[in-house]
Image (cartoon, rainbow, N blue to C red):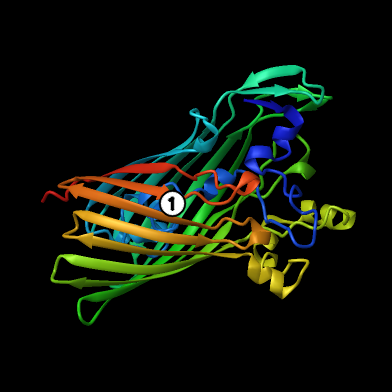
Amino acid sequence: MRRTFRGFLSGGLLFTSPFLFAQTDTLNVVTSAVPFLRISPDARAGGMGDLGVATLPDANAQFYNVAKYAFSPQKSGFALTYTPWLKDLGLTDVYLTTAAGYVKVDAEQAISGSLRYFSLGNIQFTDNLGQDLQMVRPREFGLDAGYSRKLSDVLSLGVAMRYIFSNLAGNASVNGVSYKPGSAVAGDVGLYYNKGLPESSSLSLGAAMTNMGSKIGYTNDASARDFIPANLSLGGVYSRVSNEVNRISLGLDIHKMMVPTPPSLSDSAGIVAYRSKGVVGSWFSSFADAPGGFAEELREFSFSAGMEYTYNDQFAFRMGYFYEDRTKGNRQFFSIGTGIKYNVFGLNFSYLLPSGAGVNRNPLSNTIRFSLVFDFDAGK
């Protein structure tokens, strides 16, 4: 793949420039650096429209709500997921791969960890005149560890710490500007509520703040550092079991990026204020900083709705829908998925139905994601 060096760093495939879309009053997308942290990596959640904050716990809970591990019925578990990226363009070396696992210390608490690795393949950088600069293999990863504990029979709390590394341009130097890999640290906090209801049903609720951390930069210029994708998610799932083997779950998640809304490109003072805004202050101001007021602020919420049917905890069918306002990214898609489990081994698949066209086409359209899940003591 050939890309201009300046064009790649200004956003392009990765959307790292917070001003790339802030050109009109009707299109003002909240963007951040390291957007790979926003990709739903789990095929189970992917089959339900990225629903995952309050679903029943599994090995991939670290990516959605670390607090869920405390309610896991198994003592330990591990999962691997592979997600091709931009498959519709014929690319084979751009992908996201993840690993996650946990161990229950006792009936009340668990420790966990995960790794996300995003590869963008081999990219030939060029200058504005099309002259070759260098061949680079951009890559990013996030490595984290978590701890969760039950606060009562129905409520748990979880925390996680994350190290983020992003190498987009190696150590290139262009027009007197030296570029370098960026790094940041962040944390997650989650709450999970699970209560049994009459008639073999249950209600679970979840809340998670993820990627709450420092800015990240690719030069020595402190004013050029970008926000990472801090996010707030709230969710609920209602489940019911019939005939002891059939379970159906219905759920809804609400998401809000806790990143400042970018100002108009013509607002020079606003751009300076955006760049100088502190991280902690930006989390709170992100709920009331949209230039279009309250109406635009509401458009910054996105939604995941999903359904999961399981038979005898061995076979599963899933479907879901994800909605994001057209002025805030326009990610709108249906997804379906399936899963099979035998003894300690499970395999999940998800498929994102083709959506959008041209630049609005979802990078995961026509893509099958799959996850391997191991529940090491399920055979007992």
Q: What is the number of callouts on the image?
A: 1
Closer to the camera in the image, 26 or 140: 26
Q: Residue at horizontal 30%, vertical 47%?
A: 348
Closer-to-camera residue (369/193) = 369
Find residue 69 and report its image quarter: bottom left
Q: Residue at x 66, y 66 (%)?
A: 284
Type of amino acid under label 1:
Phe
Q: Is residue 367 above or below residue 267?
A: above
Q: Position of residue 304 (x, y in %)?
A: 47, 63
Q: Position of residue 329 (x, y in %)?
A: 63, 55
Look at the image and tell me in which quarter the N terminus lies: top right
Along the line of sight, the residue nearer the viewer: 319 or 210: 319
Seen from the viewer's position, the closer of residues 193 and 361 is 361
Taking the view exactly as shown, the residue that stands out farthest to the left is 380
Q: Tell me if 215 is positioned left or right of 121 in this view.
A: right
Residue 165: image location, x then y, percent: 57, 36
Q: Is residue 293 above or below residue 340?
A: below
Residue at 50% of width from left, 28% of height from top?
93
Residue that mark 1 sits on:
63
Which SS class for mark 1? helix
